[in-house]
Image (spheres, grey):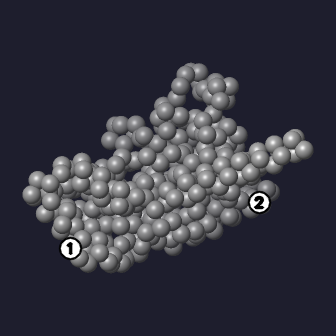
C-alpha cells in the first residue's frame, strides 16, 4: 500500500486562519490551495496558553513549526471548522485535517478580534502582545504574547509555562475594573506586569490583510488605542507609540515586532497529503463493521499525533533529569 505523503503546497498563515475566518481572503474559494475542515474523529483543542504563546513567538522569529497532514474529505466523517470561527460552508470544504489541529487553532486565534463577540457568543480565548515587555529572568521568549481565556480573563503569568496567577494577583486585576467584578473576556486585558498590551489581531490584520507597514502600522495602532481612550492599557500603549513615532522615546522592541511580523507574513507551513490508498483499508473496515467510529478515529489520531507536542515532553524530561542530578549532587555533598 502506498503511504508516501505528497506535498500539496506551502500555506501562509492567512490561508490557514481563513479556514476558520473566510472573510480574511476575498477571492473565489476555487483559487485557494485547499479548504480544510476538522473531521469528527479529531480530538478537541487541548493546547494550553503557554503552548499557544510560544508557537507565535516561534513564528515571529522564523522558527519552523512542522508540517500539516491532510487528506481528501472523508465522506464518513462529519466536519467542523475549528475552535474559533464558523469556517466555510460544508460543500466548499475539500480536505480534512489529520495532523496539526492545535497549531491551526493557535494560528487562527492570532486573527480573532479580542474585543468583540463571535456571532453574539463570547470567544473562548483571545491573544494579546505586549509592546513594552518585562520578560522574566530565564525566559526563552523574544516576544511577550499573552493569552486570555474565559476561565482566566486576566491572563497567565509571563513565564514560558504561562502558569496561573496567584489569588493576590487576581484580586489586584479585578480591582482595576470599574465594577470590581470578574470581567468578560472581551472587556479584559492581560495583567501581571503587562505594561502596554494590545490585541494581536490589530497587528495581524493590518499586516496580513491590509498590507500596512512601517510608520503607518504604528499610526494605525495608535488610532485604535485613542478610540478606546479611558481604558488603562490603551492609554499606556498610546503614550508608548507616540514617543516612538515622534522620536522622543524610540522603542527597539517595536522595531523588533515589525521585523517579526514581516517574518510571519512570509511564513509558511507545508501541507502533506495522505494518499487515498492509505485510507482505503480503514474505509473497508468501516464498511465491514469492523470497529466503531471512535475506535477508528483513535487509531488515526494515535498514528498522527501533533508533531509539535514532542518539544513539551522533551523539555519536561530535561528539567526532571536536571533536578534529579542536582538533588544527587546535594545529597552527595552532605553525606561527605
Residue at the extreme right of the image, as rendered: 336
Q: Is residue 32 left or right of residue 143?
A: left
Give the vertical position of 143 relative to 234 (above or below). Answer: below
**Residue 305 in view of the camera:** yes
Quarter of the figure that contains the N terminus: bottom left
The location of residue 95, given as percent across then percent down, is: 26, 65
Q: Quadrant of residue 162?
A: top right
Q: Is mark 2 on a helix, strand or loop?
A: loop
What's the mark number on residue 250? Answer: 2
Give the vertical position of 311 relative to 259 (above or below). Answer: above
From the viewer's side, name the closer residue of 303 and 145. Answer: 303
Which residue is drawn at the image coordinates 86% and 41% (left, top)? 335
Q: Quadrant of residue 312?
A: bottom right
Which residue is drawn at the image coordinates 81% and 43% (left, top)? 331
Q: Is residue 232 left or right of residue 27?
A: right
The location of residue 297, given as percent across then percent down, is: 26, 53
Callout 1: 10 Å neighbours few (<14), some, many (20+)?
A: few
Residue on which the image places disc 1: 277
Q: In which quarter of the image is residue 252?
A: bottom right
From the viewer's side, name the closer residue of 72 and 251. Answer: 72
What's the mark number on residue 56? Answer: none
Which residue is drawn at the image coordinates 55% and 22% (left, top)? 181
Amino acid at each position: 500500500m502506498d503511504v508516501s505523503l505528497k506535498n500539496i503546497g506551502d500555506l501562509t498563515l492567512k490561508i490557514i486562519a481563513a479556514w476558520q475566518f473566510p472573510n480574511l481572503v476575498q477571492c473565489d474559494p476555487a483559487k485557494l490551495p485547499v479548504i480544510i475542515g476538522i473531521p469528527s474523529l479529531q480530538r478537541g483543542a487541548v493546547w494550553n496558553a503557554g503552548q499557544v504563546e510560544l508557537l507565535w513567538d516561534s513564528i515571529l522569529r522564523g522558527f519552523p513549526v512542522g508540517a500539516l497532514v491532510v487528506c481528501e474529505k472523508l465522506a464518513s466523517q462529519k466536519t467542523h471548522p475549528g475552535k474559533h470561527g464558523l469556517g466555510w460552508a460544508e460543500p466548499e470544504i475539500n480536505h480534512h485535517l489529520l495532523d496539526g489541529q492545535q497549531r491551526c487553532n493557535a494560528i487562527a486565534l492570532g486573527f480573532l478580534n479580542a474585543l468583540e463577540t463571535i456571532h453574539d457568543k463570547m470567544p473562548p480565548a483571545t491573544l494579546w502582545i505586549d509592546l513594552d515587555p518585562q520578560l522574566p529572568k530565564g525566559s526563552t521568549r523574544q516576544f511577550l504574547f499573552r493569552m486570555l481565556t474565559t476561565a482566566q480573563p486576566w491572563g497567565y503569568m509571563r513565564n514560558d509555562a504561562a502558569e496561573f496567577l496567584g489569588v493576590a494577583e487576581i484580586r489586584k486585576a479585578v480591582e482595576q475594573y470599574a465594577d470590581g467584578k470578574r470581567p468578560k473576556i472581551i472587556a479584559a486585558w492581560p495583567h501581571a506586569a503587562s505594561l502596554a498590551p494590545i490585541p494581536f489581531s490589530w497587528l495581524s490584520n493590518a499586516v496580513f490583510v491590509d498590507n500596512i507597514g512601517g510608520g503607518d502600522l504604528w499610526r494605525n495602532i495608535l488610532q485604535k488605542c485613542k478610540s478606546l481612550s479611558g481604558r488603562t492599557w490603551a492609554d499606556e500603549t498610546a503614550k508608548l507609540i507616540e514617543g516612538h513615532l515622534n522620536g522622543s522615546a524610540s522603542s527597539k522592541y517595536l522595531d523588533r515586532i515589525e521585523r517579526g511580523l514581516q517574518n510571519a507574513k512570509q511564513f509558511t507551513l507545508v501541507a502533506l497529503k495522505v494518499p487515498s490508498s492509505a485510507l482505503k483499508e480503514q474505509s473497508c473496515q468501516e464498511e465491514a463493521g469492523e470497529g466503531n467510529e471512535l475506535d477508528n478515529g483513535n487509531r488515526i489520531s494515535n498514528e498522527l499525533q501533533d508533531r509539535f507536542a514532542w518539544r513539551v515532553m522533551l523539555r519536561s524530561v530535561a528539567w526532571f533529569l536536571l533536578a534529579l542530578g542536582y538533588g544527587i549532587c546535594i545529597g552527595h555533598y552532605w553525606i561527605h
